[in-house]
Image: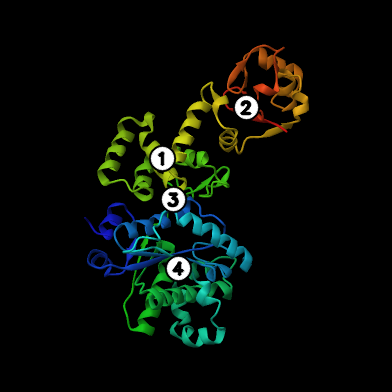
Amino acid sequence: MSSLFDELMWRGLVHEHTEEMPRLLSTSHVTAYIGFDPTASSLHVGSLLTVMGLARLQRFGHSPIAVVGGGTGLIGDPSGKTQERTLLSAEQVERNLQGIRGQLERFLDFDVRSNPARIVNNADWLCSSSLLAFLRDTGKHFTVNVMLQKESVSRRLESEEGLSFTEFSYLLLQAYDFLQLFDRYGCTVQMGGSDQWGNITAGIDLVRKMRATRVHGLVWPLLKTTSGAKFGKTEVGTVWLDAARTSPYRLYQFWLNTEDRDVGEYLRYFTFRSKDEIANLEVSVRERPAGREAQRELARDVVALVHGRDQVGRVERASEVLFGEDIGSLPVEDILSVFDDVPSTEVPASDLTGSIGIVDLVARTALAPSKSEARRLVQSGGIYVNNRRQADPHGRLTLDQAIGGRLFVLRKGARQNHLVLVV
């Protein structure tokens, strides 16, 4: 088997590294860490590259540590930011930590004997350290001249916002994390995105000065789409790994909509598929682009990793049924998750005790500006109820026709959907 370094190289995940990393990852068992900033109770697809870094590390026999920044999260990392973050309270950070822990457990094995994963909170050492002791024992090893040269600092100094002393101190805190992890767990490697290189090298220098030991670092490229857009952002906002924030269906659709020129790279970054498998899928993109086979396999793999293999079948069944006629067989919860950003109207169940006219319902939901326009749309075949075309302007709906007795899906034309929620 190739080494982890070789694996990262062919996947395009090596941007910069310390000199000994190739040899170290091929000849030694290492303990390595990656940090996660608890600014929200869920990770997002932009964090997935980092999560996969830890998962690959463990699969190659090394010991991964996920450091969730309960301490540094109270300060905020200036790396890659143009202005200072809103500071979180200790209570907010703790809530966010709990959510992130649950998501990491889907990717990492905490029970394997040989190289179990760990999740640690840097608040355990940062929040118990006194300011004077920290400045005396740690701060003296850093010169302001060197700190000003770090990219995360220099970029902010050039901006209109500037850089507060609070954020300026972040580099020291992350360096101190590396020292503590070396002392507590024998951790000798830190990994992350390329925007973390300055923080990582600061930690390497601190361990060398205080423990007379060489530790190491490796970073991968920051991810953007080939069109230059920020990865993980859509018209409806951030794509989260929490099903309550972004449904499994929406996550699946996000990956399914990957552009042809990006899909090969994403298969290398976000799946465990082999070099040959990915090469074959890239051939399908060139020769059969309309089939979107590579995008489909990418979407299946990521949804399975994040939410479980059973969710893959569920979202694919939903996709098939939603564009057929048998939408009534879907669970109400699945339909609601698929249409989570579609406008809706609540209708009291009492209004359906007898029946309600289709024309009346279309006008009530404002799919048509008036009853006369609603009638015209129905007569012309432009209105669908639960994916079935309605052609009778005198047609009526009853409660037992509602999906699960709770829901109608109205559609005007090919794309304009509206939910009717029976309450």
Q: Which of the labelled discs sits on residue 99, or is there none?
A: none
Q: CA distance from mark 4 to mark 2?
A: 56 Å
Which one is earlier in the sequence, the residue at label 4 or at label 2? 4
Image location (x, y in percent) of residue 42: 54, 54
Disc nearest the viewer among 4 and 2: 2
Q: CA distance from mark 3 to mark 1?
A: 21 Å
Q: Which of the labelled discs sits on residue 224, or is there none?
A: 3
Are the residues flagged by discs 2 and 1 in contact, CB closer than 8 Å?
A: no
Q: CA distance from mark 1 to mark 4?
A: 37 Å
Give the side of residue 292 with respect to residue 407, left or right.
left
Viewer-proximal residue, 322 or 172? Answer: 322
Image location (x, y in percent) of residue 146: 43, 78
Disc nearest the viewer among 3 and 4: 3
241 is higher (above) or lower (below) than 195 = above
Viewer-proximal residue, 300 or 371? Answer: 300
Q: How is the image coloured?
A: rainbow
According to the picture, the residue beneath numbered tag 4 turns out to be 151
Image location (x, y in percent) of residue 165: 57, 76
Secondary element at image label 1: helix
What is the quadrant of residue 402 in the picture? top right
Are the residues flagged by discs 3 and 1 in contact, CB closer than 8 Å?
A: no
According to the picture, the residue beneath numbered tag 2 turns out to be 403
Name the amino acid type tagged 2.
Ile
Name the amino acid type tagged 1.
Arg
Residue at position x 29%, y 61% from top? 61
